[in-house]
Amino acid sequence: MKLLLLLTGKTTNAQLQTLIDDYVKRLAHYVPFSIQVLPDLKNAKTLSMEQVKEQEGQLILKALSPNQEVVLLDEHGREFRSIEFADYVQRKLSSGRDVVFVVGGPYGFSKAVYDRADGQLSISKMTFSHQMIRLLFTEQLYRAMTILHHEPYHHE
């Protein structure tokens, strides 16, 4: 059972990438976790918002396999407290299926991606850049793993 974070476009802020890499390294202690970055769209500035979502959606769908569970990180998704998220992650790990968490581009997801998804998670009611969500999610996944292993990272 593997966890994958699928991203549209590379992380452009080197400081964010350094922090993300740190959490990815920490997660390796607990669970097979990786990040896959889909290429940026060419000529995206000449495309409408809907065209960008459709083309990014096609790239996302091509990267998925039928046996993977797909969870979109989406502002309309289900919210969890950290301990609840840890329970959610435990249920996913127990299912035996590979789980792909997907961060879309700045305009969100196409209808086809929503249709393929098995669920949606929201990190917060606040809006964050799709670049920041990468860091926030990897930190929360690490936090969930420390909660599940009764380690002193999370205080409640």
Image (cartoon, helix red, strand yellow):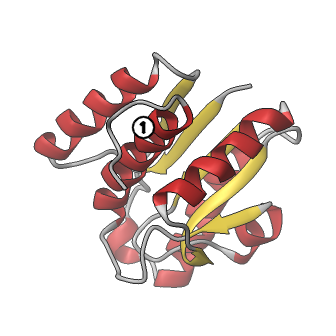
Q: Please give the name of the residue rendered at 30% of the width and 58% of the height, measured from the top-left corner.
A: 131
Q: Where residue 151 sits in the image (x, y, percent)?
A: 41, 30
Closer to the camera in the image, 107 or 144: 144
Q: Secondary structure at mark 1?
A: helix
Closer to the camera in the image, 1 or 116: 1
Left or right of 140 in this view: 103: right
Closer to the camera in the image, 14 or 24: 24
Closer to the camera in the image, 135 or 56: 135
Q: Identify the image quadrant of the C terminus.
A: bottom left
Q: Where residue 12 sits in the image (x, y, percent)?
A: 21, 49
Q: Which residue is mark 1?
A: 142
Q: Please give the name of the residue rendered at 11% of the width and 42% of the height, measured from the top-left corner.
A: 15
Visible residue check, residue 98: no
Q: Quadrant of residue 39?
A: top left
Q: Where residue 37 sits in the image (x, y, percent)?
A: 46, 39
Q: In the rendered image of this protein, does residue 136 appear above or below residue 18?
A: below
Tag 1: amino acid: Tyr
Q: Please give the name of the residue rendered at 32% of the width and 49% of the height, measured from the top-left corner.
A: 155
Q: Where residue 66 sits in the image (x, y, percent)?
A: 88, 42
Q: Quadrant of residue 41?
A: bottom left
Q: Identify the image quadrant of the N terminus.
A: top right
Mark 1 Cα shell of 10 Å, populated few (<14), some (14-19), many (≥20):
many
Q: Please give the name of the residue rendered at 55% of the width and 67% of the height, measured from the top-left corner.
A: 80
Q: Residue furthest front?
A: 156
Visible residue check, residue 129: yes
Total of numbered circles in the picture? 1
Q: Residue furthest top?
A: 29
Left or right of 40 in this view: 5: right
